[in-house]
Amino acid sequence: MATPPNSNMSPAEKAKAFDMAQLEMEYRVDLYNAMTASCFAKCMDTRYKEGDLNVGENSCVDRCAAKYWQVTGIVGQMLGGMQQQQQQPR
Amino acid sequence: MNPADLEGLPEEDKQKMVSMIDNMQMKDSLRMYNRLVEKCFKDCVDSFRRKNLDSNEERCVTKCCEKFLKHSARVSVRFAELNAGAEAMMQQQVLQQQQKGG
């Protein structure tokens, strides 16, 4: 997403790029963890009869991940739109 | 961000990025450990008449861990696919915009 630090940047720009890269990585890690937790809660049988995922659970996880991603996209768009509205002069 | 982004960097910057990534992975592993313990405890342990886990609870916790780890692995595969798909789409959009402007 953001421009990674590169050798053409001034030290100040590079420092900022590092910070952005770190922020972005943390965001992705959080996103992955939230997706994992949500889809586990939605798809897994908590009786834990088996250590393996059955076919139903596998499909559920795949679809859950896809839907979660779509929700992330929609929320991103809505937040972006709202921010634009707030920044426009009244 | 993928490993290829780090290629063009001077050594010192690359080291900085690598150590940042290592640090985050460490932190994330520790967090996952705690989360997994909490989850399996919540789902598997209900009675407190005895001090030790009985064999059912032990089996439940073991299966809970196995299941979660397998689930995590599957989600990470899908996550990588979705990520790659989104990046490809973005690159396509950038290309289209360039073609329009050019």
Image (cartoon, coloured by chain):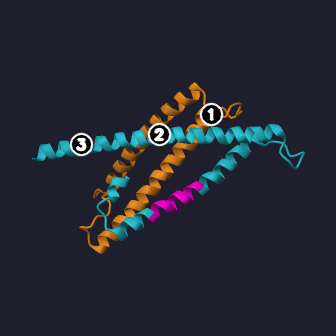
Residue at 32 percent of width and 44 percent of height = B87
Query: Could you tell me how far apart the alpha carbons at marks 3 and 2 are, in whole angstroms?
Result: 25 Å
Q: What's the magenta region?
A: B19-29
Chain that bears disc 2: B
Callout 1: few (<14), some (14-19), or many (20+) C-alpha neighbours within 10 Å? Answer: many
| Residue type at tag 1 | Met
Residue B43 picture quarter: top right
Image coordinates for residue B95, horizontal then vertical, percent? 20, 44
Secondary structure at badge 1 equals loop
Image coordinates for residue B99, horizontal then vertical, percent? 13, 43
Image coordinates for residue A65, horizontal then vertical, percent? 48, 37
- The chain whose colour is cyan is B
Chain that bears disc 1: A
Is B26 one of the magenta-colored residues? yes
Can you identify the residue that label 3 sits on? B93
Q: Are marks 3 and 2 on the same chain?
A: yes
Q: Using residue B57 as the reference point, say whether residue B51 is left or right of it.
A: right
Can you identify the residue that label 2 sits on? B77
Q: Is residue A84 above or below residue A35?
A: below
Chain that bears disc 3: B
Residue at 38 percent of width and 62 percent of height = A20
- The chain whose colour is orange is A
**Marked residue nearer the N-terminal end (3 or 2):** 2
| Residue type at tag 3 | Gln
Can you identify the residue that label 1 sits on? A44
